Image (cartoon, grey):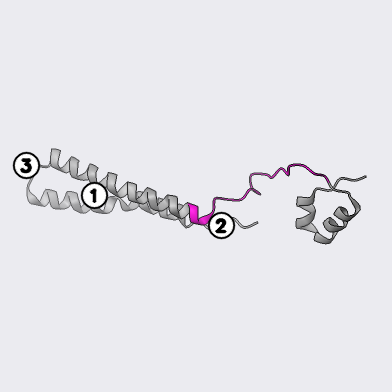
Amino acid sequence: MKAVDLHQSAVQNKAEAFAACRRGQFQIGPVRLSPSERSPMPVRLRKLIGTVLIIILVIVYALAAVTFASLLLGASPWWVHLLYFFFTGLLWILPAMLIIKWMEKPANNR
């Protein structure tokens, strides 16, 4: 009797897999999937994780930027504060962009 891997047969030819089941020529057991065949992280979960990471990033970044400014730029002129907060206000976008790019990665359809 020839054992038939139902996962591969079902993908390749459903009629052949059905006929093999009817004849009793199937192997019961765990199906081993290669890493490329495993299902990727669901899109909704990826977006939830990314959203939480961005919120944490913004809070930690804002606290660090304000703490750094108050400790080191206290006696500086107004234009130094303006430049500092202008650049630090834009700098958080770089790590957020990486998180958003990861969140929007297309699903790996088989």
Any magenta on residue 44? yes
Query: Which secondary structure is most common in the magenta stretch?
Result: loop
Q: Which residues are magenta?
A: 27-45
- Residue furthest to the bottom in view is 15
- Residue 62 screen position, x and y as percent: 24, 47
What amino acid type should be assigned to the residue bearing mark 2?
Ala
Residue 107 bears which disc, if any? 2
Q: Nearer the viewer, residue 56 or 76?
A: 56
* Pair 3/2: label in front: 2
Identify the element where label 2 is drawn.
loop
Label whose residue precedes the other's in the sequence (1 or 2): 1
Identify the element where label 1 is drawn.
helix
Q: Dot 3 corresponds to which residue? A: 75
Q: Dot 1 corresponds to which residue? A: 88
Any magenta on residue 3? no
Label whose residue precedes the other's in the sequence (1 or 3): 3
